[in-house]
């Protein structure tokens, strides 16, 4: 009987089911598979109310970004946005009140 020189390796199909992550830890999470969602933003937000708080982010401007609090006035917002541009810190809502003031 003739024997082939190269034998192909037989690839078996996966018998084990894909389980949803953390379905074994939490009752509310069922075992049926869901694609894991990634974080929309890679950097964490830190709430800013005064301009001096931005200097904390100066060394960590790649991992953290600033977000101006809702109760900060327009004048202070402008100062924070200008200082963030100098320190190369990303501000997520830098156009928030500036846009509405310029339209009027």
Image (tube, rainbow, N blue to C red):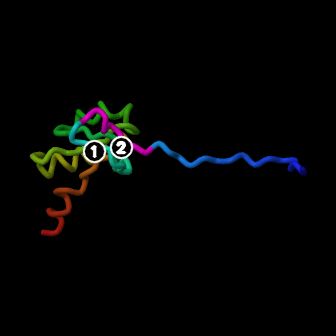
Q: Residue at x 83, y 47 (%)?
A: 6
Mark 1 packing: few (<14 Cα in 10 Å), some, or many (20+)?
Answer: some
Mark 2 packing: few (<14 Cα in 10 Å), some, or many (20+)?
Answer: some
Q: Quadrant of the C terminus?
A: bottom left
* Residue 7 placement (x, y as % from top left): 79, 47
- The quarter of the picture where residue 96 lies is bottom left
- Compared to residue 38, the image places residue 62 above or below, namely above
* Residue 4 placement (x, y as % from top left): 86, 50
Most extreme residue toward the right is 2
Residue 38: which disc? none
Most extreme residue toward the bottom is 104
* Residue 58 placement (x, y as % from top left): 35, 34
Q: Residue at x 38, y 37 (%)?
A: 63
Q: Residue at x 35, y 40 (%)?
A: 21
User: Helix, strand or loop at disc 1?
Assistant: loop
Q: Is residue 63 magenta?
A: no
- The quarter of the picture where residue 61 lies is top left
Q: Earlier in the sequence, mark 1 or mark 2?
A: 2
* Left or right of residue 10: residue 94: left
Q: Which residues are magenta?
A: 17-26
What secondary structure is the magenta-colored segment mainly? loop
User: Badge 1 is on which residue?
Assistant: 30
* Left or right of residue 99: residue 25: right
* Left or right of residue 89: residue 14: right
Toward the viewer: 50 or 68?
68
Disc 1 versus disc 2: distance between alpha carbons?
7 Å
* Residue 64 placement (x, y as % from top left): 33, 38
Most extreme residue toward the front is 1
User: Helix, strand or loop at disc 2?
Assistant: loop
Tell whether label 2 touches label 1 (CB within 8 Å).
yes
Q: Residue at x 15, y 50 (%)?
A: 75
User: Badge 2 is on which residue?
Assistant: 20
């Amino acid at each position: 009987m003739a024997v082939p020189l190269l034998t192909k390796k037989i690839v078996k199909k996966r018998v084990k089911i894909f389980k949803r992550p953390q379905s074994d830890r939490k009752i509310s999470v069922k075992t049926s598979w869901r694609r894991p969602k990634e974080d929309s933003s890679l950097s964490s937000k830190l709430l800013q109310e005064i301009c001096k708080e931005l200097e904390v982010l100066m060394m960590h401007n790649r991992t953290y970004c600033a977000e101006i609090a809702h109760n900060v006035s327009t004048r202070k917002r402008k100062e924070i946005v200008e200082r963030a541009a100098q320190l190369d810190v990303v501000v997520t809502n830098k156009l928030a009140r500036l846009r509405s003031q310029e339209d009027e």
